[in-house]
Amino acid sequence: MLDHRGTTVEGAKTRRPGFGAALAAEWSRSTTLVQARLAPVVCALVGAAVAGLFLFTAETTTGGSVSAMSALDVVTTSMLGVDAATFVVVVLVASLVASEQSTGLNRVALLAVPRRGRRLAASALVMAAGGMLCGLAAGLSAFGAGQLVSALSDGTTISFTAPGVARIILGSVVMVPFYGTVTLACTTVARSLPGGVVGTLGLFILPTVLAWIPGDSLDGILRYLPGEAVHAVAGFGAGTDTLHPVTALVVLAAWVVAFVGAAHLWTRRRSW
């Protein structure tokens, strides 16, 4: 039996649901949503379609044909499909969180897990797991589509186990759970789909905006931004200032903790 604070009452003893219960509740709730169950399939289709589109139009957009590309260049270009899948996940997460808040479903969830920080952390972990699944679906399908287009264009093909290929694919996949979790935090704060999407896209394009600033005074900062950290994990650009892959993963984790932590502090100042 639950009292008004959501604690279990058994005689004189009270017990709050633990983090494991919160995590199980969030996972169960998320996996019952049709949109969430279809997300990996949609991401796989989007990843393959965008990868094929960019490679088919490479000669028009870049002036070079697929047959003239190196095998790793084909793989790298194919990963643009993962970028597209990331935007799909961003919009999906923002719509689900905004809908939950506008309809009051989040209040129902708080009856089972009354501690907002605990529930938000559980939601972030579930989002990261689901995002990784969507990213893997998009990355593998984009890789497969890229190899198919390259073969049809008399270009060079390469296997997943070839040196450098797995790192490019898996490193690119990391951006899906990262930006999905950031969207969760941004939408929790903004309480609207546009606000969550715009907040995430702002972080996404931040390296490009800062790169427009003349001089090299921001070079030391740029490599710690999420976009550059993802590139470091995937092995894009092996410059002397590029972060080590493990360091880059730690940087991405720190960004996630900062965003989710800020969302928690914000929600404590208002009623859900």
Image: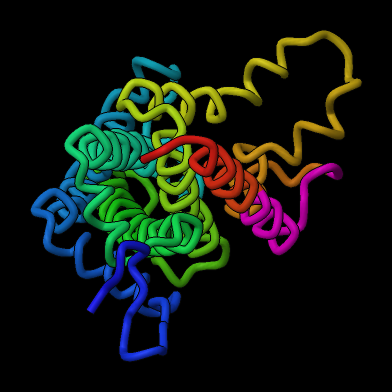
Q: Is 251 colored magenta in this rendering?
A: yes
Viewer-nearest residue: 194 or 208: 194
Indicate how the structure is coloured in the image. rainbow
Residue 58: name its quadrant.
top left
Is 262 on the left or on the right of 123, as rendered? right
Q: Is 230 colored magenta in this rendering?
A: no
Give the residue drawn at x 37%, y 63%: 5
Residue 62: tell me if it is visible.
Answer: yes
Viewer-nearest residue: 191 or 37: 191
Q: What stretch of residues is rendered in magenta?
A: 240-254
Residue 46: name its quadrant.
top left
Image coordinates of residue 261 in percent, x first then y, are: 60, 49
Image coordinates of residue 89 in percent, x first then y, are: 31, 42
Give the residue drawn at x 27%, y 43%: 47
Give the residue drawn at x 76%, y 57%: 244
Give the residue drawn at x 78%, y 10%: 213
Question: In this picture, is 186 found above or below 174?
Answer: above
Residue 231: tell me if it is visible.
Answer: no
Q: Main secondary structure of the magenta part?
A: helix
Is 66 on the left or on the right of 45, as rendered? right
Instruction: Classify the position of the N terminus by image quarter.
Output: bottom left
Residue 48: name its quadrant.
top left
Viewer-nearest residue: 221 or 61: 221
Image coordinates of residue 240 in percent, x first then y, are: 86, 44
Question: In this picture, is 137 found above or below 6?
Answer: above
Please tell me how many numbered marks the rendered image carries: 0
Viewer-nearest residue: 39 or 189: 189
Instruction: Classify the position of the C terminus by image quarter.
Output: top left
Q: Point out the residue furthest to the left here.
A: 34
Q: Point out the residue furthest to the front here.
A: 12
Image coordinates of residue 59 in percent, x first then y, are: 36, 21
